[in-house]
Image: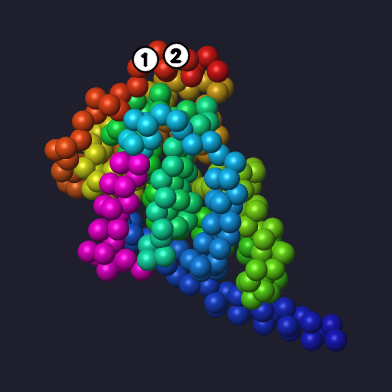
Amino acid sequence: MKTFRKLLILALTVVLTACGTTNIVPLTGRKQSLLVSDQQILSLSTQQYSEYMATAKASNDPAKTAMVKRVGERISNAVVNYLRQTGQAADVASYNWEINLVQDNSANAFCMPGGKIVVYDGILPLTQTEDALAIVMGHEVAHAVAKHSAEKLSKQMKAQYGAQALNILLQGQSSMWQQIGQAAFGFGANSVLRGYSRANESEADYMGLIFAAMAGYNPEAAVTFWQRMAQNSTSSVPAFFSDHPSDEKRIANIQKWMPEALKYYKPAQTVTNKTATIKSTDLKKTKKK
Ligand SMILES: [Zn+2]
């Protein structure tokens, strides 16, 4: 009986290893091994997104809300166009983009799989311009397009559940699956939205820079934005940034990628940064909190 169980576990492990799919990340061409499908990831993240949005307070500033929606639309359009042109449209076929600005003092933003973008209004005094906001939103959209949460979840499942992971996958909407969703897309310490690896963060920086440029935003805004971030670094630096590469390393990388990003940059004629500029008094208010 023991031998039978061992064989069964071995068989499950082999199947589990074999049933993972290899995905190629757009722009970087990096190969990643995924255990969970887009549909599985969406079923987990959509529920967590709905629960989050049910309690979130939408911004009551029409101008800032319009700016965030405009940046999100231009970036998502640019990403979808690029993926279509390069034969990778399947990567975002199941996306249903939603762009929100919510009231929250922390300087944060995220994009869940499926294109659910949330920007906290606490980040606007730090971005200051629409170009810099595009850098932040491009970075978050890049995490989603590069399937970083599926990648992290696949690694976690392999490590924590081993052969059991196959059962969890086969059971679909079991309570175990719901628990995984909660841990993965909730807002706790283990959320996949929180702790991406340094390599994934760097990949999102690179892709986000190019996505922002493709959408007609000046990628050079990334350098001044991160310099501003470095100057504002205090104990109040939000969790959003703490898992990311150090400011110096990040700025050095961005400068290295700049010539390539600028090749994608065609300034949009209709956009003005005047409405996007936040008054310096707003910045002071945020710093005190
Ligand atoms: Zn990130």
Q: Residue at x 53, y 31 (%)?
A: 104
Query: Would you name the residue on which mark 1 appears?
Result: 280
From the top left corner, tell me how far across and down residue 247 is, in percent. Answer: 42, 30
Compared across the picture, whether 263 is left or right of 42 comes to left
Secondary structure under the numbered disc 1 in the rendered image = helix
Q: Residue at x 56, y 22 (%)?
A: 235
Q: For the residue marked with disc 1, what is the amino acid? A: Ser
Q: Is residue 199 visible?
A: no
**Image: magenta residue range:** 69-91
From the top left corner, tell me how far across and down residue 125 is, in percent. Answer: 40, 24
How far apart are the two marked residues, 1 and 2, measured between alpha carbons? 7 Å
Q: For the residue marked with disc 2, what is the amino acid? A: Lys
Q: Quadrant of the N terminus?
A: bottom right
From the top left corner, tell me how far across and down residue 65 is, in percent. Answer: 38, 35
**Residue found farthest to the right:** 1
The yes-or-no answer for disc 1 within 8 Å of ligand 1 is no
Query: Would you name the residue on which mark 2 appears?
Result: 284
Q: Is residue 79 magenta?
A: yes
Residue contact between numbered discs 1 and 2, judged by CB atoms under 8 Å: yes
Q: Nearer the viewer, residue 44 or 5?
A: 44
Q: Is residue 5 visible?
A: yes
Q: Which image quadrant is residue 22 in?
A: bottom left
* Colour convention: rainbow
Q: Nearer the viewer, residue 35 or 3?
A: 35
Q: Quadrant of the C terminus?
A: top right
Q: Is residue 210 magenta?
A: no
